[in-house]
Amino acid sequence: MAKVSVFGYGAVGRETAWMLSGRGDAVRVVQRTEPKPLPARCTFQASDVTDRDATIRACAGADTVFCCIGLPYDSAVWRRTWPQAMTNLIDGCSAAGARLVFADNLYMYGPQNRPLVEDMPLTEYGRKPAIRSEVTRLWKAAHDSGRVRAVAVRAADFYGPDVATSVIAAYGVARYLARKPALSPYYPDYPHDFDYVPDVARALVTLGDAADDAYGQAWHVPHAPTQTLRAVLTQAANLIGVPPRITVVPRAVVALGGLFNSQMRETLEMGFQWDHPYLVDASKFRARFWSDATSFEDGLSATIASYRNR
Protein backbone atom coordinates (compact mmCIF):
# COMPACT_ATOMS: atom_id res chain seq x y z
CA MET A 1 0.00 0.00 0.00
CA ALA A 2 1.55 3.26 -1.13
CA LYS A 3 1.20 6.48 0.83
CA VAL A 4 0.47 9.46 -1.39
CA SER A 5 -0.45 13.12 -1.06
CA VAL A 6 -2.65 14.62 -3.76
CA PHE A 7 -2.50 18.41 -3.82
CA GLY A 8 -5.62 19.85 -5.42
CA TYR A 9 -9.04 18.25 -5.83
CA GLY A 10 -10.28 19.67 -9.11
CA ALA A 11 -11.21 17.41 -12.00
CA VAL A 12 -7.76 15.82 -12.34
CA GLY A 13 -6.94 15.64 -8.62
CA ARG A 14 -10.32 14.14 -7.82
CA GLU A 15 -10.00 11.44 -10.48
CA THR A 16 -6.44 10.68 -9.41
CA ALA A 17 -7.42 10.35 -5.74
CA TRP A 18 -10.29 8.00 -6.60
CA MET A 19 -8.04 5.88 -8.82
CA LEU A 20 -5.32 5.58 -6.19
CA SER A 21 -7.68 4.88 -3.31
CA GLY A 22 -9.61 2.38 -5.42
CA ARG A 23 -6.55 0.19 -5.74
CA GLY A 24 -5.82 0.37 -1.99
CA ASP A 25 -3.35 3.24 -1.59
CA ALA A 26 -3.52 5.49 1.44
CA VAL A 27 -4.39 8.87 -0.03
CA ARG A 28 -4.10 12.24 1.66
CA VAL A 29 -6.04 14.97 -0.16
CA VAL A 30 -4.50 18.40 0.40
CA GLN A 31 -6.06 21.79 -0.24
CA ARG A 32 -7.41 24.74 1.71
CA THR A 33 -10.98 23.47 2.13
CA GLU A 34 -12.23 19.93 2.62
CA PRO A 35 -14.08 18.44 -0.36
CA LYS A 36 -16.99 16.06 0.15
CA PRO A 37 -17.42 13.25 -0.35
CA LEU A 38 -13.94 11.82 -0.18
CA PRO A 39 -13.36 8.26 -1.41
CA ALA A 40 -12.58 5.43 0.98
CA ARG A 41 -8.98 5.33 2.25
CA CYS A 42 -8.72 9.08 1.71
CA THR A 43 -7.97 11.52 4.49
CA PHE A 44 -7.95 15.28 4.26
CA GLN A 45 -5.32 17.77 5.37
CA ALA A 46 -6.01 21.48 5.16
CA SER A 47 -3.05 23.31 3.69
CA ASP A 48 -2.18 26.25 1.47
CA VAL A 49 0.47 25.39 -1.09
CA THR A 50 1.90 28.91 -0.78
CA ASP A 51 2.71 28.20 2.88
CA ARG A 52 6.07 26.42 2.95
CA ASP A 53 5.79 24.90 6.42
CA ALA A 54 2.24 23.68 5.81
CA THR A 55 3.28 22.16 2.49
CA ILE A 56 6.19 20.32 4.11
CA ARG A 57 3.80 18.90 6.73
CA ALA A 58 1.37 17.79 4.02
CA CYS A 59 4.15 15.93 2.20
CA ALA A 60 5.51 14.23 5.31
CA GLY A 61 5.26 10.45 5.23
CA ALA A 62 4.31 10.29 1.55
CA ASP A 63 6.03 8.04 -0.96
CA THR A 64 4.71 10.12 -3.86
CA VAL A 65 3.23 13.60 -4.10
CA PHE A 66 0.87 14.43 -6.94
CA CYS A 67 0.60 18.12 -7.80
CA CYS A 68 -2.85 18.59 -9.34
CA ILE A 69 -3.47 22.14 -8.21
CA GLY A 70 -5.35 24.65 -10.33
CA LEU A 71 -5.18 28.41 -9.96
CA PRO A 72 -7.59 31.13 -11.05
CA TYR A 73 -7.05 31.96 -14.71
CA ASP A 74 -5.29 35.20 -13.93
CA SER A 75 -1.72 36.03 -14.95
CA ALA A 76 -1.10 38.11 -11.84
CA VAL A 77 -2.17 35.22 -9.61
CA TRP A 78 -0.02 32.83 -11.61
CA ARG A 79 3.03 35.10 -11.35
CA ARG A 80 2.56 35.43 -7.60
CA THR A 81 1.63 31.83 -6.81
CA TRP A 82 3.00 29.23 -9.23
CA PRO A 83 6.76 29.66 -8.57
CA GLN A 84 6.16 29.73 -4.81
CA ALA A 85 3.89 26.68 -4.94
CA MET A 86 6.41 24.65 -6.94
CA THR A 87 9.29 25.71 -4.69
CA ASN A 88 7.33 24.64 -1.61
CA LEU A 89 6.37 21.30 -3.16
CA ILE A 90 10.00 20.63 -4.04
CA ASP A 91 11.02 21.45 -0.47
CA GLY A 92 8.26 19.22 0.89
CA CYS A 93 9.17 16.28 -1.32
CA SER A 94 12.86 16.72 -0.56
CA ALA A 95 12.19 16.66 3.18
CA ALA A 96 9.95 13.59 2.90
CA GLY A 97 12.08 11.71 0.37
CA ALA A 98 8.96 11.60 -1.82
CA ARG A 99 8.75 11.62 -5.59
CA LEU A 100 6.90 14.51 -7.28
CA VAL A 101 4.45 13.90 -10.14
CA PHE A 102 3.31 17.17 -11.69
CA ALA A 103 0.01 17.40 -13.62
CA ASP A 104 1.11 19.92 -16.23
CA ASN A 105 -0.28 21.53 -19.37
CA LEU A 106 1.24 22.51 -22.73
CA TYR A 107 1.58 26.25 -22.36
CA MET A 108 5.38 26.22 -22.02
CA TYR A 109 5.82 25.33 -25.70
CA GLY A 110 4.26 28.61 -26.85
CA PRO A 111 3.25 29.07 -30.50
CA GLN A 112 4.34 26.16 -32.70
CA ASN A 113 3.67 25.08 -36.27
CA ARG A 114 4.27 21.37 -35.82
CA PRO A 115 3.03 18.66 -33.44
CA LEU A 116 4.17 19.24 -29.88
CA VAL A 117 6.93 17.01 -28.52
CA GLU A 118 8.34 16.93 -25.02
CA ASP A 119 11.82 18.24 -25.84
CA MET A 120 10.73 21.49 -27.49
CA PRO A 121 12.49 24.59 -26.08
CA LEU A 122 10.69 26.44 -23.31
CA THR A 123 8.98 29.61 -24.47
CA GLU A 124 9.26 33.15 -23.15
CA TYR A 125 6.10 34.10 -25.00
CA GLY A 126 3.29 35.90 -23.18
CA ARG A 127 2.55 35.82 -19.48
CA LYS A 128 1.03 32.45 -18.58
CA PRO A 129 3.20 30.42 -21.00
CA ALA A 130 6.36 32.09 -19.68
CA ILE A 131 5.31 31.35 -16.09
CA ARG A 132 4.81 27.66 -16.94
CA SER A 133 8.32 27.69 -18.45
CA GLU A 134 9.68 29.11 -15.19
CA VAL A 135 7.91 26.43 -13.16
CA THR A 136 9.33 23.77 -15.48
CA ARG A 137 12.85 25.05 -14.87
CA LEU A 138 12.27 24.87 -11.11
CA TRP A 139 11.30 21.19 -10.93
CA LYS A 140 13.82 20.19 -13.61
CA ALA A 141 16.70 21.90 -11.78
CA ALA A 142 15.63 20.30 -8.50
CA HIS A 143 15.63 16.89 -10.16
CA ASP A 144 18.95 17.39 -11.95
CA SER A 145 20.61 18.51 -8.71
CA GLY A 146 19.40 15.41 -6.88
CA ARG A 147 17.12 17.27 -4.46
CA VAL A 148 13.99 15.46 -5.63
CA ARG A 149 12.84 12.93 -8.19
CA ALA A 150 10.34 14.83 -10.31
CA VAL A 151 8.37 14.22 -13.49
CA ALA A 152 5.77 16.18 -15.48
CA VAL A 153 2.69 14.66 -17.12
CA ARG A 154 1.45 17.11 -19.73
CA ALA A 155 -2.12 17.07 -20.98
CA ALA A 156 -3.90 18.82 -23.83
CA ASP A 157 -7.27 20.54 -23.32
CA PHE A 158 -9.25 18.02 -21.32
CA TYR A 159 -12.88 17.08 -20.95
CA GLY A 160 -14.99 14.62 -19.01
CA PRO A 161 -17.58 14.36 -16.26
CA ASP A 162 -17.77 17.42 -14.04
CA VAL A 163 -15.10 19.45 -15.85
CA ALA A 164 -16.51 22.94 -15.56
CA THR A 165 -13.83 24.61 -17.70
CA SER A 166 -14.10 22.20 -20.65
CA VAL A 167 -15.30 23.55 -23.98
CA ILE A 168 -16.57 20.08 -24.89
CA ALA A 169 -18.38 19.47 -21.59
CA ALA A 170 -19.52 22.86 -20.33
CA TYR A 171 -20.04 24.63 -23.66
CA GLY A 172 -21.11 21.55 -25.59
CA VAL A 173 -22.67 18.66 -23.68
CA ALA A 174 -24.32 20.80 -20.99
CA ARG A 175 -25.86 23.15 -23.54
CA TYR A 176 -27.08 20.35 -25.81
CA LEU A 177 -28.81 18.72 -22.84
CA ALA A 178 -30.49 22.08 -22.18
CA ARG A 179 -31.62 22.08 -25.83
CA LYS A 180 -29.35 25.01 -26.65
CA PRO A 181 -26.67 25.23 -29.35
CA ALA A 182 -23.10 24.53 -28.35
CA LEU A 183 -20.79 27.51 -28.03
CA SER A 184 -17.36 27.54 -29.63
CA PRO A 185 -15.09 30.35 -28.42
CA TYR A 186 -12.79 29.76 -31.38
CA TYR A 187 -12.81 28.46 -34.96
CA PRO A 188 -13.97 24.84 -34.58
CA ASP A 189 -12.65 23.30 -37.81
CA TYR A 190 -8.92 22.98 -37.17
CA PRO A 191 -7.70 19.57 -35.97
CA HIS A 192 -7.21 19.78 -32.21
CA ASP A 193 -6.22 17.16 -29.65
CA PHE A 194 -8.18 16.64 -26.43
CA ASP A 195 -7.54 14.44 -23.38
CA TYR A 196 -10.16 12.63 -21.33
CA VAL A 197 -9.69 13.37 -17.61
CA PRO A 198 -9.63 9.72 -16.46
CA ASP A 199 -6.84 9.15 -19.00
CA VAL A 200 -4.93 12.09 -17.50
CA ALA A 201 -5.31 10.57 -14.03
CA ARG A 202 -4.29 7.15 -15.32
CA ALA A 203 -1.15 8.69 -16.84
CA LEU A 204 -0.31 10.38 -13.53
CA VAL A 205 -0.71 7.11 -11.65
CA THR A 206 1.37 5.35 -14.30
CA LEU A 207 4.26 7.76 -13.75
CA GLY A 208 3.79 7.49 -9.99
CA ASP A 209 4.46 3.76 -10.39
CA ALA A 210 7.25 4.12 -12.97
CA ALA A 211 10.93 3.44 -12.43
CA ASP A 212 13.25 6.32 -11.58
CA ASP A 213 14.62 6.48 -15.13
CA ALA A 214 11.24 7.87 -16.27
CA TYR A 215 11.77 10.92 -14.06
CA GLY A 216 13.54 14.18 -14.84
CA GLN A 217 11.50 14.62 -18.01
CA ALA A 218 8.00 15.30 -19.35
CA TRP A 219 5.48 12.87 -20.83
CA HIS A 220 2.43 13.67 -22.98
CA VAL A 221 -0.86 11.97 -22.11
CA PRO A 222 -2.20 9.70 -24.89
CA HIS A 223 -5.44 10.83 -26.49
CA ALA A 224 -8.09 9.58 -28.89
CA PRO A 225 -7.41 10.05 -32.63
CA THR A 226 -7.34 13.73 -33.54
CA GLN A 227 -10.64 15.42 -34.35
CA THR A 228 -11.85 18.96 -34.87
CA LEU A 229 -13.95 20.56 -32.16
CA ARG A 230 -16.87 20.60 -34.58
CA ALA A 231 -16.59 16.85 -35.13
CA VAL A 232 -16.47 16.17 -31.39
CA LEU A 233 -19.46 18.42 -30.67
CA THR A 234 -21.38 16.82 -33.55
CA GLN A 235 -20.70 13.40 -32.07
CA ALA A 236 -21.92 14.61 -28.67
CA ALA A 237 -25.12 15.97 -30.21
CA ASN A 238 -25.75 12.70 -32.01
CA LEU A 239 -25.29 10.72 -28.78
CA ILE A 240 -27.74 13.02 -27.00
CA GLY A 241 -30.18 13.00 -29.90
CA VAL A 242 -30.32 16.71 -30.68
CA PRO A 243 -29.34 18.72 -33.78
CA PRO A 244 -25.58 19.51 -33.80
CA ARG A 245 -26.01 23.27 -33.70
CA ILE A 246 -22.85 25.27 -32.93
CA THR A 247 -22.60 29.00 -32.38
CA VAL A 248 -19.09 30.24 -33.08
CA VAL A 249 -18.11 33.33 -31.10
CA PRO A 250 -16.19 35.65 -33.47
CA ARG A 251 -12.63 36.49 -32.40
CA ALA A 252 -13.50 40.19 -32.51
CA VAL A 253 -16.27 39.62 -29.97
CA VAL A 254 -13.86 37.80 -27.65
CA ALA A 255 -11.38 40.66 -28.00
CA LEU A 256 -14.08 43.23 -27.31
CA GLY A 257 -15.31 41.25 -24.33
CA GLY A 258 -11.77 41.25 -22.98
CA LEU A 259 -12.05 44.99 -22.43
CA PHE A 260 -14.71 44.33 -19.80
CA ASN A 261 -14.19 40.72 -18.68
CA SER A 262 -10.86 39.65 -17.19
CA GLN A 263 -11.48 35.96 -17.92
CA MET A 264 -11.99 36.66 -21.61
CA ARG A 265 -8.99 38.97 -21.63
CA GLU A 266 -6.78 36.23 -20.21
CA THR A 267 -7.72 33.87 -23.06
CA LEU A 268 -6.49 36.21 -25.80
CA GLU A 269 -2.77 35.44 -25.42
CA MET A 270 -3.59 31.74 -25.78
CA GLY A 271 -5.03 32.15 -29.27
CA PHE A 272 -2.05 30.25 -30.69
CA GLN A 273 -3.69 27.06 -29.42
CA TRP A 274 -6.79 27.63 -31.57
CA ASP A 275 -5.86 29.62 -34.67
CA HIS A 276 -4.29 26.66 -36.50
CA PRO A 277 -4.11 22.87 -36.08
CA TYR A 278 -3.00 22.05 -32.52
CA LEU A 279 -1.54 18.56 -32.34
CA VAL A 280 0.13 16.71 -29.48
CA ASP A 281 2.60 13.89 -30.09
CA ALA A 282 2.25 11.32 -27.30
CA SER A 283 4.28 8.61 -29.03
CA LYS A 284 6.96 8.58 -26.31
CA PHE A 285 4.42 7.70 -23.63
CA ARG A 286 2.64 5.16 -25.87
CA ALA A 287 5.87 3.36 -26.65
CA ARG A 288 6.82 2.88 -23.00
CA PHE A 289 3.53 2.62 -21.10
CA TRP A 290 0.10 2.27 -22.72
CA SER A 291 -1.69 3.50 -25.82
CA ASP A 292 -5.36 2.59 -25.30
CA ALA A 293 -6.70 6.10 -24.68
CA THR A 294 -10.44 6.41 -24.21
CA SER A 295 -12.40 6.88 -27.44
CA PHE A 296 -14.51 9.98 -27.93
CA GLU A 297 -17.61 7.79 -28.04
CA ASP A 298 -16.91 6.35 -24.59
CA GLY A 299 -15.65 9.61 -23.10
CA LEU A 300 -18.58 11.63 -24.41
CA SER A 301 -21.07 8.98 -23.28
CA ALA A 302 -19.69 9.12 -19.72
CA THR A 303 -19.70 12.92 -19.80
CA ILE A 304 -23.29 13.03 -21.01
CA ALA A 305 -24.37 10.56 -18.32
CA SER A 306 -22.73 12.63 -15.59
CA TYR A 307 -24.53 15.80 -16.67
CA ARG A 308 -27.85 13.96 -16.94
CA ASN A 309 -27.45 12.64 -13.40
CA ARG A 310 -26.94 16.07 -11.86
Image: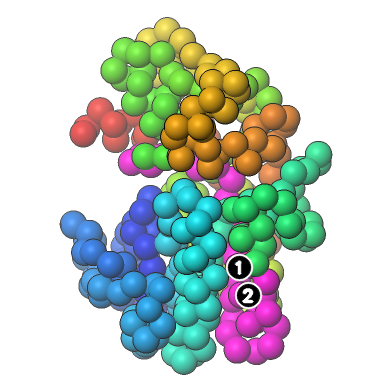
- Quadrant containing the C terminus is top left
Label of residue 138 in the image: 2
Label of residue 135 in the image: 1
Please identify the residue farthest to the top as the structure is shown.
243
Q: Nearer the viewer, residue 217 or 46?
A: 46
Q: Position of residue 14 (x, y in %)?
A: 34, 56
Q: Position of residue 50 (x, y in %)?
A: 41, 73
Which secondary structure, mark 2? helix
Measure the C-alpha gap from mark 1 to mark 2: 5 Å
The answer to the question of whether label 1 and label 2 lie on touching residues, with beta carbons closer than 8 A, is yes
Can you say whether 134 is above or below 166 in the image? below
168 relative position to 45: left or right: right
Color encoding of the figure: rainbow
Q: Residue at x 53, y 42 (%)?
A: 266
Q: Residue at x 78, y 43 (%)?
A: 112
Name the kind of residue labelled 1 in the image. Answer: Val
Q: Magenta stretch?
A: 135-163
Residue 244 seen by the camera: yes
Which secondary structure, mark 1? helix
Can you say whether 297 is above or below 27 in the image? above
Label 2: how many residues lie within 10 Å, few (<14), some (14-19) or many (20+)?
A: some
